[in-house]
Image (cartoon, rainbow, N blue to C red):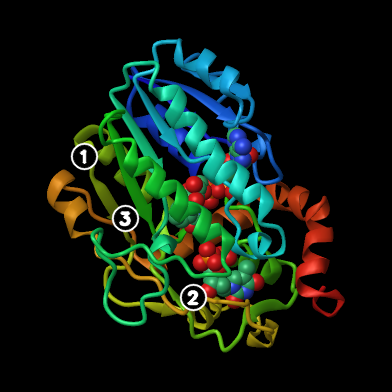
Amino acid sequence: MNLLVTGGLGFIGSNFIRHILGYRQSWKITNLDKMTYSGNSDNHADLLKDSRYAFVNGDICNKKIVNDLLTKSIDAIVHFAAETHVDRSICGPEEFSITNVTGTLTLLECSKNVRLHRFVHISTDEVYGAKKYGKSVETDRLNATLGNPYALTKEAADKLVQSYFLHPNHLPITIVRPSNNYGPYQYPEKFIPLAITNALENKPIPIYGDGKQMRDWLFVEDNCEAILAVLERGKAGEVYNIGGTVFRDYTNKEIVEIILDTLKKPKSLMVYVTDRPHHDVRYSLNYEKLMRDTGWGPRTSLSGGLEKTIKWYVDNHAWWERIKSGQFKEYYLKQYGGGNK
Ligand code: NAD
Ligand code: TYD
């Protein structure tokens, strides 16, 4: 299989490429990534020597680049590239609309010129909007929260992708909607790596509002296995939820408590800050359809996944210190103010 992966220098994309090269010896991967602030060349440093891996620095909105790549006998596209951080989308939605909507549309349009075996679009559970009780199923109405441009642009992209399965395009698309991922190589603006790295630096950990919000936390390795299962055994035209919760939901506050206990740091590092506007209280996914069609199921408990993730950040200080000492500082000051350094 010859794959085109978009956004493979980011968190999930780089984990996915490493997963495929490890488990599918004969596959080849081309990674198209624009190297935005979250696309990190350190994330593929160990892959560059592998002759099965090629990197192209480019934008998914650039038709010429995408068309050129697609003439190289690509069998399938796995489309991760996106602007992904909710807080950044609230402050500046333009890039979100360009990459998440126009970029996805560009890939779809260019895909019409070739014969693909599959186009896997990586959507998100955020397209369902908040789910106060119960679990979202694939047939639920998409209802991204107004005021959260990340979720809104992902919803728009999701709908565009679905439409390309239909007449007259008939592209072999499959959509996956994973829940919140965590694990190695996650940019430290997201909640779990921010909490771990701030704790390691003995800095306050900002908790929005009352800290009672819940996410359906999914260990990134389990997500990579699920996407591979969808690529190999999922059906064209289908949507698959990928969730991580096995036993029960955890609140944001409980997650920070586990991190602090593991690192033997004081609870006084927890600081409650002004809530995010339009903050979705809870996401939760029903992933029975994926289990039924592919046999996949999440293997990592939250405590096991957090232990592995914390160990990775402890062992890879240089990776996140480089990020936190750069442009990130400016973002952090703007987002959390000077009082939370
Ligand atoms: P990330 O922000 O870590 O990585 C995004 C990557 O896309 C970066 O390498 C960036 O350089 C690249 N990129 C951005 N704009 C681009 C463009 N115009 N052209 C080419 N490359 C571009 O994101 P992530 O957390 O790895 O998320 C990957 C995908 O998974 C996204 O589509 C996201 O919506 C989805 N998703 C993420 C989560 C999560 O918890 N992280 C959960 C559900 C779904
Ligand atoms: P985040 O990692 O930004 O993912 P998403 O918004 O896509 O779910 O946030 C996860 C949860 O953690 C969410 O409820 C917001 C909360 N959060 C905080 O409490 N403090 C923070 O500093 C951040 C970044 C997030």
SS for dot 2:
loop
Quarter of the rendering occupied by the N terminus: top left
Q: Is residue 54 above or below residue 167?
A: above
Quote the CA–CA distance across marks 3 and 1.
12 Å
Q: Ligand 2 quadrant?
A: bottom right
In percent of the image, x 58 and y 22: which residue is there?
A: 55
| Mark 2 or 1, nearer chain start | 1
Question: Helix or strand or loop: what does disc 1 sit on?
Answer: loop
What residue occupies the far left of the structure in this picture? 292
The residue under label 1 is: 234
Q: CA distance from mark 2 to mark 1?
A: 29 Å
- What amino acid is at disc 2? Asp
Residue 282 location (% of width, % of height) = 42, 76
Position of residue 141 in the picture relative to residue 144 (left or right): left
Apparent side of residue 290 relative to residue 319 in the rendered image (left or right): left
Residue on which the image places disc 2:
280
N-terminal-most mark, 2 or 3? 3
The residue to which callout 3 is attached is 242
Q: How many marks?
A: 3
Q: Amino acid at mark 1?
A: Gly
The quarter holding residue 329 reads bottom right
Task: Assess disc 3: are there few (<14), some (14-19) or many (≥20) residues with their C-alpha within 10 Å of its C-alpha.
Answer: many
Residue 176 is situated, as x and y percent measured from the top left of the image, at 34, 48
Q: Going by the image, does 196 lie left or right of 282?
A: right
Judge from the rendering whether residue 268 lies leftward or rightward of residue 297; answer left or right: right
Mark 2 within 8 Å of ligand 2, using the beta carbon: yes
- Specify which label sits upstream in the sequence, 3 or 1: 1
Amino acid type indicated by mark 3: Ile
Confirm if mark 1 falls within 8 A of ligand 1.
no
Residue ID at (21%, 51%): 290
Q: Quadrant of residue 217?
A: bottom left
